[in-house]
Amino acid sequence: MSDREKEIEKKEEKEIKKETEKKEEKEIKKEVKKDTAEEKKASSSSSEREKDAQEEEEAAPLPNQDKLDKLVALFKGQVSEDAVVDAYINELDHHVPVVTVHSDHLLACAAILLSDEQLKLNYLRNVSGVDYETHLEVVYQFVSMELKHHYVIKVKTDRDQPVVPSLTSLWKTADWNEREIYDLLGITFTGHPNMKRIMMPDDWVGHPLRKDYEAADPEV
Amino acid sequence: MSIRTEELLVNVGPQHPSTHGVFRLVVKLDGEVITEATPVIGYLHRGTEKLAENLSYTQIIPYTDRMDYLSAMTNNYVLCHAVETLMKLEIPEKAEYLRVIVMELNRVASHLVWWGTYLLDIGAMSPFLYAFRDREKIVELFNELCGARLTYFYMRVGGVKWDAPPGWIDKVKEFIPYMRKQIEEYEKLVTGNEIFLSRVKDIGKYDSQTAINYGLSGVNLRSTGIDWDLRKQEPYSLYEQFDFDVPTSTDGDCFARYRLRIEEMKQSLSIVEQAVAQFPEEGKIMAKVPRVIRPPAGEVYSRIESPRGEIGCHIVSKGKAEPYRLKFRRPSFVNLQILPELLIGETMTNLVTIFGGIDIVLGEVDC
Amino acid sequence: MDNMIEQLSIGSVSLVTLATAALLLIVLVFVTYGIYFERKVIGWIQLRQGPNRTGPFGLLQTVADVFKLLIKEDTIPNNADKTVFKLGPIISFIPAFVVLAVIPYTENLYFANLNVGLLYYVALSGISTIGILMGGWASNNKYALLGGMRSVAQMISYEIPLVISMVGVILMTGSLNMIQIVEGQAGGFWSWNIFPQIVAFGIFIIAAVAELNRTPFDLPEAESELIAGYHVEYSGFRFAFYMLSEYVYIYAIAGLTTVLFLGGWHAPFAFLSFIPGLIWFIIKFCSIVFFLFWIRATMPRLRVDHLMGLGWKVLLPLSLVNIFVTAIVLELLK
């Protein structure tokens, strides 16, 4: 496996060299790099983020910044001071406000999302699970059909003992989505009525979407 | 003397004519009345999301063809659109026109297959063949455009692969009035049929609250009176330029969903008509894209309106040529969740009606 | 007693056997080409060609199909009730064939001139239901059981309006003898029973289609729900027997409709009576068969509860009213 990865990396390097030879593509690459830099800013940790935010507020506030601030204040005020782990605007994705919530407070925060008069996020459009190798993350995409705005809520969880409260009691959409994440990434959703595998057979070993998952047959 | 009665446990599927693929429904029957229904899926799970983590973005596109194989064009688009959003690419106008034309034609083709198979489920044989005759015309148009009939692999990040061959736009222009006439004929044949109406009216009813709570999208949501079509609500591509309606109904039953799909075909034809009328003959079909696509690090969730509802693509990129994590929000998968609730207390006959009315594609459910 | 033995001489027995064999042959030819015709008609309605490869114009397609069924492995599910499983197709087929005896084709061409011909038909055709139930039950398959149950419920519900709709015709003729029923309709198409008994004709046709288990009443087989219903576990020749009995019933029902309502072998106009009666019979017979195929290609399938509702709440009262009206009108016209 590792040899193969090395090979792939080598190939990539070659490709990069080829690219750099072309002038036109160079320009694009520069743009791409710029974007990456911006993105790095956006996704950096909360302490740095606050600094950045202060700087940016002085310069030009991002669109939706007020929405994000309101939501963070709401969570901190109504749920708990440490409910919010991180908050930023995802500029690449239509400037959607993203709030990372502590998994202990997820249910309380979600209840606010659903009931708050100014949020009314009644539609859970997607739930994804991501394996970041250091931790696992569940990403919830919310939208309000009345107020036509969207928010993203994230929850981080430990890789060895991944547990996240289930949102099935609030949005039934979460049911199969959470089962799929349990099946493919191994995150257990507490309070889920039917926490069973959905895609793989019931006796399957391992969770295929984990980055360190070893296929039963390495040839596949 | 009392007669001993038992609940009957019936496996509907995975091999069953009305499950439209390898879908299994474990049904408990009391006589012919369903007391419990448990869907079992995963028979067609190919691990597209896992495979994608080792593929370049262009290589993933053919995999999307195989998800919702009845509307591969919209699947192509959602992935390309996600990557383009990440890269902030400007798509040439001509490419966008071609994309809209093929996506809307594909919507018509997809709804035609639904129409035919739904009536086959209900027991009418002929509409199936009529629907396939007209779908064939669309498929032939696609074949001429990109050389494939089902798995098109037509769109690329930054545009489309092939320009419209000479005369193709004229063929599309000819097709529109033909299809309109056919739809009218279909309505005469089926929509007024008493038996058909008695089979679909007031069957599989749910209200808008339930629909939202279950995250239903597409026609399943609009049949409860909610005006939610991503082409209007969150316009992508060129949809803002076109004049079209989003048909809704407040009945929330199978007949409402039937009517909306017929109506959507007409609206799609009107979009195609406008698009071919404005179609720019000159222009590029691909934006300037590096040969190896490396979107910047970041996260994006792009969503569009597929014939079955909101299809979404959630990409987590780390700036490499392969996505770090790729997740598809498949409308069929989400829409199917409501099925067990709808089936309680219904008969075997209504099972087929309700299940068909949701309109799922198994390739997409299992992904 | 002596009289009977005298009648059953070797000569008469062999004659009856020969005639029966001839009828069986005719029926088999009808079924073969009935299926071919059905596939062609439905094919044309559905913009297809229908069978056109085996033999000229595909004429040998059904022969090939039957041959395939004959040489196919005969499978019986392990947990099936084997005796009943084997008996089912036979019990289903025999009455279908036996009822044909009383159908008169012309005033001279018939097999049995029973004075209770109609009653005989109704009584025997009811037995087929048992064959279907046996097949559905013995297969030890849930879909087959559901199909068998549906079939019994449906056939019993529709047999009643079917029989009662015939009573109007019987009242008008004053006989249960099929030949006399046809004789009563002589003299141009206006004296056919279809016109005075138009309500009965409608009920009869609907109930007949339901009796035949054909679209839109093909719930026992409903391939989209029950896959194939009662014969889902049958293969090879046992399956062929079920199909055969279905098509023989088409033959029987088409013949019965012609006799009861369409004036049998009588020409619609006196000046057309130079054409032999048998030809007229065949023309009427074929139009009924075509009609059955036509609706199969057009209609969706009914739902079980609607089907029962239609049978008990609409057709039965209507056929009863029809009897009363017929009786009153006949009394007044006396």
Image (cartoon, grey):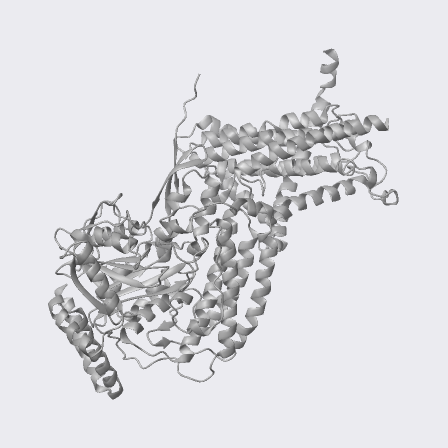
Residue A16 seen: yes
Residue A151, given in percent of the width and then of the height, sits at: 27, 62
Q: Is residue B197 above or below residue A133?
A: above
Nearer-the-camera pick, C247 or B65: B65
Residue B78, given in percent of the width and then of the height, sits at: 35, 67
Is residue A211 left or right of B361 when viewed as pictured? left
Residue A116, given in percent of the width and then of the height, sits at: 28, 55
Is residue C55 left or right of A192 when viewed as pictured? right
Nearer-the-camera pick, C83 or B116: B116
Is residue B42 left or right of C182 when viewed as pictured? left
Is residue C43 left or right of B349 when viewed as pictured? right
At x 29%, y 53%, the residue is A115
**The N terminus of chain B lies in quadrant:** top left
Q: Quadrant of residue B71?
A: bottom left
At x 20%, y 84%, the residue is A20
Residue C155, given in percent of the width and then of the height, sits at: 58, 32
